Amino acid sequence: MIENFLELVDIEDIEFTDKYENMIDISVDIDQSFSLSNGIISHNSALGTCITGFASTGRDFYGAFPLKGKPLNVRDTALSKIKENEEIKNIITALGLEFGKKYTSTKELRYGKVVFFSDADLDGAHIKGLLINIFETFWKELLELDFIYEFVTPIVKIEKGKDAKFFYKLDDYEKWKQTNQKGWFVTYYKGLGTIEAHEAKDFFKNINKHLIRFHYDKPDETKDIIDLVFREKRADDRKKWLLNYKPGTIIDKFTQKTTFDSFFHDEFIEFSMADNIRSIPSVVDGLKPSQRKVLYTMFKNKYTNKIKVANLSGAVMEKSSYHHGPQSLEGAIIGMAQNFVGSNNLNLLQPLGNFGSRLKGGKDAASSRYTFTLLSDLTRNIFIPTDDDILNYLDDDGFSIEPDYYIPVIPMILVNGSNGIGTGWSTSLPNFDTKDIIKYLVLNLKGQATEQLHPKYNHFKGKITYDEKNDRYVTTGIIKKINMSTLNISELPIGISNDKYYEILDGLIDKKIIKDYTKNDTDVKVDITVSITREMLKEIEDKDSMIQTFKLESFISMSNIHLFNRNSQIKKYGSIDEIIQEFSEIRLEYYQKRKDYILSQLERDRKILLNRMKFINNILKGELELKNKKRTEIEEKMIELSLEKVDDSFSYLLNMSLLSLSNEKLLELKETYNQKKIEIDELTKTTIKQLWLKDLNELYKKIK
DNA sequence: CTGAAGGCTAC
DNA sequence: TCTCGTAGCCTTCAG
């Protein structure tokens, strides 16, 4: 019997063009155009890698099929929807599967094995899991029939001359690194596209070494974990599962048996964790990693001229090791720069060009090729440059990247709010007014009573009220009676775009509640005139009824606020006060750190000035001879004269200009020294609360 | 009560 | 080049 394979290839942007009557010879279009903006690394796509590899195996017994993006989660999904899904239809055709059929042997299928060939990253693990979910749901017996495999590819390659060695576990590479080898060039394989053609051919030559079977060892546990991971209603179980996760289980796929069970518990779970990390912001800076990477790049590159969004995206990828697609990153940049009503209260980036409007909820933004951005004027009043030096910068494969979190002057998480969807958890928090927040912090710092903060949106003309009964805020648009048959809508509730609202009005026409409406909206002004019959108007005339009929309400729930705390744990926050409290604690700690840091810098300056003065004095008085002396002799004498080294060296004294050795210079230095001392005294006397108040005051003035 | 839709970072 | 599909959680809304 022929042993043949179907590789399920995970790739994006690939069109599977030919209808394959014969799975053994597939024609494909290969998009090989993706490359990083600096042009150093080029990416081929995974299917290309696979097809290249087939040069070693031949194509008679191998077929490859490219998947696009994430497959459907078939658990709890209507069979009708599953059967309509293009990807699933294709997989079924390719493998010769039938719904409802029970297989006793893989010989009933068109291929003897199915192999997952995905990027060796976390989204790749997610895709493998979703595929396993499909087989487990409809053809569970295939899990027991040695049918499901994955193709493992290396994570790191090291090269020296003609020598090359691959590591399939990061752990192995780390161990090798500790043996202190020199002169090796290291490549991280971030995706299948990193694999070179000749390498793909080698891997496929030894294909059996690379094919790892999923074993079906613990039926009950396997069934349970797949259900826990994919069943829609089990988010709370997933919470528990993720909270119990202990990182660091390193799997050696070559020596250890991979079971479906261990795959979900050790590998898939890493995706779930990462899904939360990228989707849920930090309580400290209010940012998600992609946004933080953008800010980091803006700070680091210190752009003075506006930069094209597409170019900024490339810079972020490079400077902050962003390993995902550019579209996603560009979306993050655009989102950070938007400032229409309902988006940011304080956009950290400037929207130079069309970044979208409330007409389409921001979806009308122009392409990143056409738009520009730059830091906003206020950004550096919130993220103070001096604090850059006291942050905890992360490391990506030995490359310094953005900090675990920034520490802004105000809790930015409240200013712009946040929405995010992770695994087990999601989060949603509305916007608050920057000036309200500053006032709150100032009163807090002065030990005075604070007022409850309520959500607020810049330039929103409607009302936001608290609905005690339902414990939620209600945002209300504005509708006014012009005459007995005409109404005017001049504001929409938060979160409803003009576009969406027209659909609502169309619905009202269908229901014969209104006759017609005219749009006079601009991108910044809502202006809709509604014509209605006198009778109908009378019926709905009272204010509440009008708001409800015209659906001019939206709701803000405060019951799903999850944020990463300073210790990188997801925490549920019950109130705004709690967020400010936790933010304030860490902010004050970091004012102490900032103060200590600046004082140490000033002390260093003072020491340098003092020693320069002493040094000049020593020379002018003839206590220190430089002429015809060896450096070692001079330095010994300097120590005798109790001159101090800085950074373990006297260079800062011995490299001084000859012109400095004068009384005039001495007087000048004395002046600077005295100023430095005053500066030190003043900072020493300033409390950390005063430092914070000063920053808040400056920010407040600038906002006004 | 159930199913669908929307928000958002990723594929 | 542009549009569209998928995951994941929670809330709202229509039927």
Image (cartoon, coloured by chain):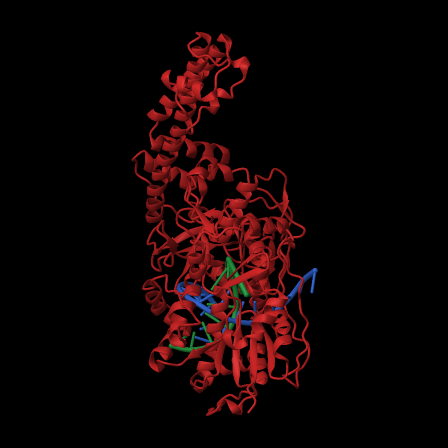
Chain colours: A red, B green, C blue
Q: Can residue A249 be seen in this view?
A: yes
Identify the residue shown where x is 37% and y is 81%.
Answer: A217
Residue A338 in view here: no
Q: Where is residue A176 in the image (x, y as percent from the top left)?
A: 44, 57
Q: In which quarter of the image is the N terminus of chain A?
A: bottom right
Judge whether A476 appears above or below A303 on screen.
below
Numbered disc total: 0
Residue A148 placement (x, y as % from top left): 48, 80
Q: Residue A549, percent across and down?
A: 50, 63
| Residue at 50% from the left image edge and 9% from the top image edge | A664
Q: Which sits in the foreground, A130 or A619?
A: A619
Please give left or right for residue A264 compared with residue A86 in the image.
Answer: left
The residue that appears at 43% across and 11% down in the rendered structure is: A617
Given residues A417 and A66, the one toward you in this image is: A66
Question: Splitting the image into 4 quarters, where does residue A263 fall?
Answer: bottom left
A518 vs A561, left or right, is right
Residue A45 position within the rendered picture, expressed as x and y whole percent measured from the top left = 62, 66
> Image height check: is A364 above or below A269?
above
Q: Locate residue A626 relative to residue A11 in the image: left or right.
A: left
